Image (spheres, rainbow, N blue to C red):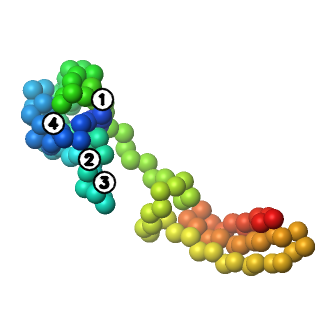
Amino acid sequence: MSKKLYVGNLSFQTTESDIRSTFEACGSVESVTIITDRDSGRSKGFGFVVMEEPEAADKAIATLNGAQLDGRTLTVNEAKPMVKKAFGAGGGGGGAESFRLSLFYLRNHSGGLSESLDLNSAGWTRVVWNHN
């Protein structure tokens, strides 16, 4: 059974083949992925390695966490499952589980209040704010 590892603090010049050859010293590597910026294509400085055997992954963590690669001190640990961010937690995005519909009722209260009725993945929410 394979095990996925997080590899952080990568040099922007480090390639997937550099990472593969480094991790193969600890066991068989199933895959290597460097995470890149979708607009520029530049490395974000971290990635993931999938080791074919859990024992090889444990050896890689023990051996390579804190080791040097391309002048950088690596962070290597077991990858955590990706957690979906709640709507409004930042970042923009979209998708089937992230939506928002706003019905605005702009009112000219003497206090300068506006309100809207918002529908998002959590349900309906009434939002009132003062714009004075």
Mark seen at residue 19: 4
Residue at which label 1 appears: 75
Callout 1: 10 Å neighbours few (<14), some, many (20+)?
Answer: some
Label 4 to label 3: alpha-carbon separation: 19 Å
In primary-sequence order, the first of circles 2 and 4 is 4
Q: Which amino acid does label 1 sit on?
A: Thr
Q: Where is residue 55 in the image (x, y as percent from the top left)?
A: 19, 26
Numbered disc 4: secondary structure: helix
Q: Do the residues labelled 2 and 3 touch (CB within 8 Å)?
A: yes
Callout 3: 10 Å neighbours few (<14), some, many (20+)?
Answer: few
- Along the line of sight, the residue nearer the viewer: 61 or 105: 105
Instruction: Report the residue at 36% width, 39% height from top.
Output: 80
- Tell me: 40 left or right of 118: left
Label 2 to label 3: alpha-carbon separation: 6 Å
Mark seen at residue 43: 2
Label 2 to label 4: alpha-carbon separation: 13 Å
Looking at the rendering, which quadrant does residue 32 occupy?
top left
Residue at which label 3 appears: 37
Numbered disc 3: secondary structure: loop
Q: Nearer the viewer, mark 2 or mark 1?
A: 2
Relative to 22, residue 47 above or below:
below
- Along the line of sight, the residue nearer the viewer: 13 or 99: 13
Callout 4: 10 Å neighbours few (<14), some, many (20+)?
Answer: many
Instruction: Report the residue at 30% width, 46% height from top.
Output: 44
Label 1 to label 4: alpha-carbon separation: 12 Å
Q: Nearer the viewer, mark 1 or mark 3?
A: 3
Q: Do the residues labelled 2 and 1 touch (CB within 8 Å)?
A: no
Q: Which amino acid does label 2 sit on?
A: Ser
> Considering the image in quadrants, where does the N terminus appear?
top left
In primary-sequence order, the first of circles 2 and 1 is 2
In primary-sequence order, the first of circles 2 and 3 is 3
Q: Where is residue 24 in the image (x, y as percent from the top left)?
A: 10, 31
